[in-house]
Image (cartoon, rainbow, N blue to C red):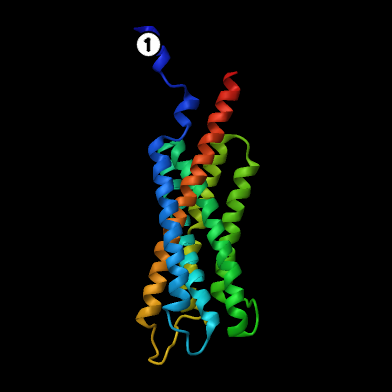
Amino acid sequence: MRDVETRTRRTPAEELRPAEDADRTRRLWGLLAGISLVVLLAMAFWYAPEDANQGAAQRIFYIHVPSAWIGFLAFGVVFVASIAFLATGARRFDDLAAASAEVGVVFTTAVLITGPLWGRPVWGVYWTWDPRLTSFLMLWLIYLSYLVLRGYVPEPIRRARFSAVLGIVGFLDVPIVYLSARWWRSEHPTQFVVEGGELPPQMLVTMIVGVVAFTFLYLYLLSVRRQVARLRAAAELEEVAR
């Protein structure tokens, strides 16, 4: 009986390897992300009307705004997971925070790239030290520093604790970014005009599709990043066990 238990018991490295259900879920997120992104591009170019003031450049809106919202979502996950880690000490929360931070930096980088491409034909310059742009740049730098910190501290427990504190404090910049255009005078566009003076239903629907598509993409990238982390940890345990 003991021999059977010994043969069937999984090693710590084997337990860290992704389960088949996780693989199926990840493939599902990838499929949904791919389909919804194709739909988004089709709607952005052929369904949503062209903005009366900004012209074709406004179509960057359907990439720029969803990227910003998903960046906020990713850093919100970092915030919650960091609090959970400090409260419980469970490694899975630290792993989740680290993965979400990396994906969040990807999306916020996309915002900082598409913003100037949109701003150049509208404002006449690629960058201006507008309150929202400046606060968003600070947000990006905070979470870039978060990733640098994780790579700099070698000891796992200290790394997780320091990163959790920075992940919590850094999230305080998210409401500042969101409310900056209301608190201070800002040139950042807050309204898109087509004849009637309000965001048309076609634009609104396309933007919502963009948020959904980028949410699927976030979930897919998050699951891939967590799989990579688990495989790396499993490989390290196997190396130690030899």
Q: Position of residue 2 (x, y in %)?
A: 37, 7
Q: Confirm whether residue 187 shows in the render.
A: no
Residue at (62% x, 76% y) in the render = 129
Q: Quick one: quadrant of the N terminus?
A: top left
Residue at (46% x, 58% y) in the render = 34
Q: Position of residue 88 (x, y in %)?
A: 40, 37
Q: Is 236 placed above or below 160 here? A: above
Q: Quick one: quadrant of the C terminus?
A: top right
Q: Mark 1: give few (<14), some (14-19) or many (20+) Cα within 10 Å.
A: few
Q: Is 83 placed above or below 66 here? A: above
Q: Is 46 placed above or below 150 here? A: below
Q: Nearer the viewer, residue 61 or 71?
A: 61
Residue at (45% x, 35% y) in the render = 18
Q: Nearer the viewer, residue 106 or 179?
A: 106
Q: Is residue 9 left or right of residue 151?
A: left
Residue at (56% x, 57% y) in the render = 105
| Label 1 element class | helix
Residue type highlighted by circle 1: Val
Furthest residue toward bottom = 195
Q: Confirm whether residue 135 shows in the render.
A: yes
Q: Is 235 placed above or below 60 here? A: above
Q: Position of residue 200 (x, y in %)?
A: 37, 83
Number of disc labels = 1
Residue at which label 1 appears: 4
